């Protein structure tokens, strides 16, 4: 009887975890933007138009621009009270508050650090930022005290022929991606693991794995298992953002908001 129960449990376990992940349509919102960045917990929308960052809520809209720093390369809204703007051409970062006021002056990595060519930036805890520089290493940098806290080995030490294309972080871990996989480190810069990935057009962190876009189809990868995500969206996806239980896609004219079921 015990063996029969175990057998039935394993069948149910495998069946339940082999199913697709379903979503429900929430809303469709028009947006005139060059790039959709994402949405925060209060569903404020962040986007870039003519190199100006906008934050749009139900009743208020804020904007920020800095023409002296060239093209705005990336925006990190992981903490909406400490938004990280990266200007790669000027090797600089500026942090903004929740009303897009400057929290810091320009942080110029050329003068404040030895990193002349920072490639990617991601948020970290307290007064720290994760930097990936042209030395192919991750650096944890304290921007208030102007000190480096952590430095990893060059990434080819962990995975041969690794060429970084982006970095993404939580407050506990950071991942460096290339076109074939991801290298994960913890908050202390210790190597955790390498995960092989199939070809993708976009990838984001979700729970214990990744949600990625491939040929306009979304999938969730966790524990070496791939779960298809059902989403009623047929048009090409220009930008996409995952926030806890929601998916936002942008086709260049409209934002489509879905919730995971």
Image (cartoon, rainbow, N blue to C red):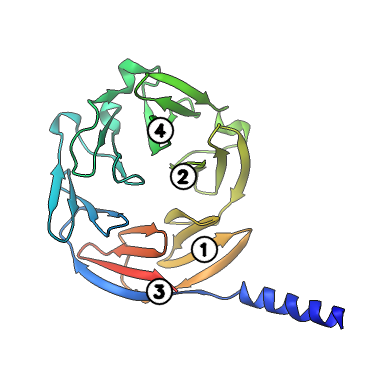
Q: Position of residue 87 (x, y in %)?
A: 27, 33
Q: How many marks?
A: 4
Q: Secondary structure at mark 1?
A: strand
The numbered mark, 4 or 2, whose residue comes first in the sequence reads 4
Residue annotated with mark 3: 231
Badge 1 crowding class, 10 Å Cα cut-off, few under 14, some 14 to 19, many 20 or more, is: many
Element type at mark 3: loop
| SS category of the residue bearing label 4 | loop
Say whether residue 140 is left or right of residue 157: left
Between marks 1 and 4, how big is the CA–CA gap?
A: 30 Å
Is residue 77 shown left or right of residue 128? left
Name the residue rendered at 18%, 37% in the picture: 101
Q: Choose between 141 and 144: the one closer to the eye.
A: 144
- Looking at the image, tell me whether mark 4 or mark 3 is earlier in sequence order: 4
Q: Which residue is mark 1?
A: 220
Q: Quadrant of residue 3?
A: bottom right
Q: Tag 2 or tag 1, which sits nearer the N-term?
A: 2
Q: Residue at 33% across / 63% down in the picture? A: 248
């Amino acid at each position: 009887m015990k063996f029969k129960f175990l057998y039935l449990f394993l069948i149910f376990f495998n069946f339940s975890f082999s199913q697709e992940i379903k979503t429900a349509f929430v809303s469709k919102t028009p947006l005139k933007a060059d790039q959709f960045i994402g949405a925060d917990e209060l569903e404020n929308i962040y986007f870039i138009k003519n190199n100006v960052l906008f934050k749009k809520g139900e009743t208020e809209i804020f904007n920020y621009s800095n023409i002296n720093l060239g093209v705005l390369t990336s925006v990190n809204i992981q903490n909406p009270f400490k938004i990280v703007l990266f200007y790669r051409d000027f090797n600089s970062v500026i942090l903004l508050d929740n009303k897009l006021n400057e929290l810091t002056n320009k942080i110029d990595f050329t003068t404040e650090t030895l990193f002349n060519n920072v490639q990617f930036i991601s948020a970290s805890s307290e007064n720290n930022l994760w930097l990936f520089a042209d030395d192919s290493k991750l650096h944890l940098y304290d921007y208030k005290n102007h000190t480096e806290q952590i430095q990893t080995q060059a990434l080819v030490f962990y995975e041969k022929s690794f060429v970084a294309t982006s970095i993404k972080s939580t407050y506990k871990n950071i991942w460096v991606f290339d076109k074939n996989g991801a290298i994960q480190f913890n908050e202390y810069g210790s190597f955790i693991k390498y995960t092989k990935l199939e070809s993708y057009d976009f990838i984001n962190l979700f729970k214990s794995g990744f949600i990625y876009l491939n040929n306009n189809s979304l999938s969730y990868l966790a524990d070496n298992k791939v779960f298809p995500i059902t989403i009623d969206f047929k048009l090409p996806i220009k930008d996409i953002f995952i926030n806890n239980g929601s998916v936002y896609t942008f086709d260049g004219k409209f934002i489509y908001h879905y919730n995971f079921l």
